[in-house]
Image (tube, helix red, strand yellow):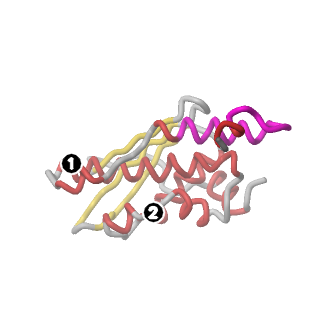
Amino acid sequence: MYSEKVMEHFKNPRNVGSIDDPDGVGQMGNPVCGDIMRMEIKVKDGRIEDAKFKTFGCGAAIATSSMVTELVKGKTLEEALAISNKAVADALDGLPPVKMHCSNLAADALHKAIKDYLTKQGDARADDIVVDERGHEHAHEHAHEHDHEQKPDKSEEEDGK
């Protein structure tokens, strides 16, 4: 079900913990599955110097948080904002469809931390960063519908109208 990389990041997560006096903090949660992620960043000269996380959630939630911290170190803020949920999942050699919401949460926690940093700096670019927290509930519910369904349900039939 999970790739070796996902299992490695779950069993041996990188960059767990907190940063003393972080420059930016982003937290995301999904009330449907209970995953909660907190991402902290340290920024120096426009680059993310350090990133740490604390995650309460499933193995995929921990693995995606761990991977985001590895992907983001040394990146400019613009490069870090370009890290998508797909990039996180790809870096982990894929995630099961029902767990893709974990990569959304991890990428969005990072984006919220960057937004927090830019807001504290009075940087207008913070206004351009939009994180849709409602989309994760919908995506998670939708993924579970497909995971357990045996016949088309009404919502799929309505989507085709």
Percent position of residue 84, x then y: 48, 60
Q: Which mark is residue 119?
A: 1
Q: Residues within 10 Å of mark 1 (few under 14, many from 20)?
A: some
Q: What residue did someone put label 2 on?
A: 83
Q: Which residues are magenta?
A: 136-155
The amino acid at mark 1 is Thr
Position of 129 with respect to 66 (left or right) is: left
Placement of 149 over or under 65, stated as above or below? above
The amino acid type, in three-letter code, at marker 2 is Ile
Queried whether the magenta region covers residue 145, the answer comes back as yes
Instruction: Give the quadrant of the C terminus.
Output: top right
Between the C-alphas of marks 1 and 2, the distance is 20 Å
Circle 2 packing at 10 Å, graded few (<14), some (14-19), many (20+), is some
Which residue appears farthest toward the left when viewing the image?
Answer: 122
Q: Is residue 23 magenta?
A: no
Given residues 26 and 137, the one toward you in this image is: 137
